[in-house]
Amino acid sequence: MNNRISCLVFLTLFYSAVAAELAVETPTTASLAEASPHWMWVSDLVFNAAEGGKAFLIDGDSGQMLGMLSTGFFFASALHDSDYQTIYSPEVYLSRGTRGERTDIIAVYNPKTLEPIDEIIIPPKRLTSVPVVGHAAISEDDRFIVVYNFTPAQSVSVIDAKNRMFIREVETPGCAEVFAAGPRAFNMICGDGTMLTLRFDDAGDVTSVRSKKFFDPQVDIIDDKMAPYGTSWAFFTMSGMVQMVSMGDGIPVFAEPWSLFSAHDLAHEWKLGGYQYATICESTAELYVLVHQGGKYTHKQPGVDVWVYDLKTKVRKRKIPLSRAATSIYVTQDEQTLMFTADAEHSGVQVYDASTGKHLHDVEDLAANPMLFWPVRL
Amino acid sequence: MSWFDYLSEQGVRGVARHTARRSFLSRLGACLVGAATIPALPVARAGGPREPAPDETGIAGNSGDPQTCNYWRYCSIDGFLCACCGGTQNSCPPGTEPSPITWIGTCRNPADGKDYIISYNDCCGKSGCGRCFCNSNEGDSPLHRPALDNDINWCLGTKSNAYHCSMGVVIGVATEPLR
């Protein structure tokens, strides 16, 4: 009898324990929440194995990674339309990984699911380099995408984003990079100190205009690092002069250049440096730049400080010392501005409150070579 | 018909009689391909005639360590040193192909005090070597001056565009100082 009671107690306890176990699960795929202006994309060059480029999506508020795209050989960054419904990613693939036939595409992704939904084949000529912001651009009305080619012949590929088709190649000898601003106009910087403007009609036919010379490449050359600001772009010379170029009317208008650095700063060798060293918050009209102290040709050295300028008064408002030196910086466009920084030679992204400089998050082990930030603009 | 015209016509007709057109085109093609694989001298920094490229082995100062970033000819290099990847400062690792077009820099050889034009040919066809990454930037310029830009993947005109590593090849003496 005692044995029977013992058995009953045992079985009761056993089944109770089983009942307390977790329910059997079925694997699913996570979905993204509604996009936030505090989300940021980070491009990974993966220089050790550049055929395996990546883009990471992170949330600046939580410091969490949200998802990733696999983006092919020498990935620079992707574009998206004005309401963040479609991501267009210029990507390069070699059929056997590091050899074989080369295919260049604009991969089309759904930003809600991060799934590839289409692709547009373009000429296998896209620039492959350490990433620059000006490798490709999308027109203000989302209609045309222009991709900079370097074979080393210089040209651009023109893509009809609406109909998802390659339209034509336009030769641009002596001119590089491409920046969109204004209605269906794209601007390029030319080695002789001028700017080339390409304008497109509905059919994608192009007319081109060359500006006057706005910098002297032998004296103080405009760098290939720049920051968008509404329908303008801020360009920087190697000595730290700011050249604002308004592009809203379809032709570039050049403002009077001004210097980021005082005589005292220059005497102490403060310089711009990095791979994406400038960013502008549109709602606060503030320019953020990565600076370091160094001699000539230290223009890729990481910044140890961020200096913040009021674009209206052209006066430095504050300095933000960084928790880790950085070669790239980007700020969100809202008034509760977040600042993201990364160093191309080290994994990880740092997030700060841009107004106070308070360090908020380290997103560790993210990207082998974080090179460029590209924002979720809503 | 002048004697020159006569001789030219006879010569051309002779070639035409003894040579198939396809053969001529193939030889011409071979010559052009051969020309394309010779490292180009993209920009003569010197204003006047360039001095003949010196014999590499005769340059004083080769005693430095080509596996370190501060080796004199790497003053404008950006990438993995081929010398650490199975190659040398002027030869690609096995199984990779030198890029025929390059960016250039001007480096001073401390041993003889001369400035040399250095062609930074990339080696192509395999994934990134990943060893001895160096990023010196003397004379490096933005993308709109591509011949002086060390950020470009110069694996162009090669069988594969895959970047493996970078070399520093002496291609001449610079006769004008670096600007």
Image (cartoon, helix red, strand yellow):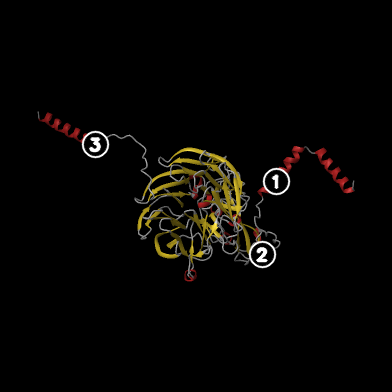
Q: What residue would you read off at disc 2?
A: B175
SS of the residue under disc 2? loop
**How far apart, in angstroms, are the residues tagged by discs 3 and 2?**
81 Å
Left/right of residue A351 with respect to residue A255 in the rendered view: left
Q: Amino acid at mark 3?
A: Glu
Residue at the location (35% across, 51% down)?
A: A61
Q: Residue at x 68, y 63 (%)?
A: B47
Residue contact at pointers 3 and 2, CB within 8 angstroms: no
Q: Amino acid at mark 1?
A: Leu
Locate the C terminus of chain B and report the quarter of the image it occupies: bottom right
| Residue identifier under label 1 | B32
Decide which of tag 2 and tag 1 comes sooner along the chain.
Answer: 1
Location of residue B99 with respect to A3 vertically, above or below: below
Q: Which residue is mark 3?
A: A21
Tell me where residue A253 appears, x and y as whole percent. Answer: 54, 57
Tell me, yes or no, whether dots 3 and 1 are on the same chain: no
